[in-house]
Amino acid sequence: MKIKLLYAILLAGIISCSTETSTINPMDTTKSEEVLNFEKSIKSLSKPENRETPEELRNKKSIELSDRRKDILIPSALELIKSTGVKDKEITQNTQGDRDKILTWAVKIYNEKLEKINQNSKK
C-alpha cells in the first residue's frame, strides 16, 4: 500500500512539473517570434553596454535615441515589419531608409499585434 501511495505522489509530481512551464506566461506563447525579438531588442537597450554613453548624454537634445542605439533596434524592427507581408522595396519606398520612420512603423505594428493578442486572450 505504501508503494502505491509513493507511486501516486511521484506521478502527481511529474505531471505537475511537466505542465508547469506551459503556464508560466501564456502571453509569450501567442506572440510571434518577430514580436519577441523586437521586445528583446528593446530590453537590450537597458544593458550596460547599450546604455547611453556620457558623450551621448552631453550631445542629447531630446528624448530621441542615439544613432548607435537605433542601430540595435533596426534589424528586429525590419523583421517585424516584414512579418506583416511587406517587402523590402515597399519599406524603402515608405521610409527612404530613415531609421526613425522604420522604428515608428515597427512600434505601430508591435502595438497592433499586442492589442490583438490581448483581445484574443480576453475571449
Image (cartoon, grey):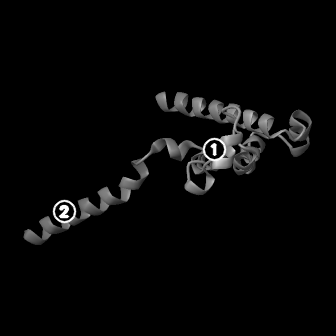
Q: Amino acid at mark 1?
A: Val
Q: Please tell me whether residue 21 is drawn above or below residue 123 in the rendered image.
A: below
**Depth check, front residue: 78 or 5:** 78
* Circles 2 and 1: CB atoms closer than 8 Å: no
121 vs 53, left or right, is: left
Q: Which quadrant holds residue 89?
A: top right
- Per the image, the residue denoted by label 1 is 35
Q: If the image is split into quadrants, where does the N terminus sit? A: bottom left
CA gap, disc 2 to disc 1? 40 Å
User: In the image as oriented, which residue stretches furthest toward the bottom?
Assistant: 3
Is the residue marked by circle 1 packed among few (<14), some (14-19), or many (20+) residues within 10 Å?
many
Provide the secondary structure element on which disc 2 rests.
Answer: helix
Instruction: Give percent across and percent down for residue 103.
Output: 74, 38
User: Which type of secondary structure does the marked residue at label 1 adopt?
Assistant: helix
Residue 110 position, x and y percent, is: 65, 36
Number of other residues with Cα within 10 Å of mark 2, as a class: few under 14, some 14 to 19, many 20 or more = few
2 is higher (above) or lower (below) than 42:
below
Look at the image and tell me whether residue 66 can be seen.
yes
Q: Position of residue 54 (x, y in %)?
A: 63, 48
The residue that appears at 60% across and 30% down in the rendered structure is: 116
- From this view, report whether residue 3 is shown above or below residue 41: below
Q: Identify the mark nearer the N-term, 2 or 1.
A: 2
Q: Which mark is residue 9?
A: 2
The image position of residue 18, as x and y in percent, is: 36, 59
Residue at x 36%, y 54% (from the top left corner)? 20
Task: Answer left or right for 100 relative to 25.
Answer: right
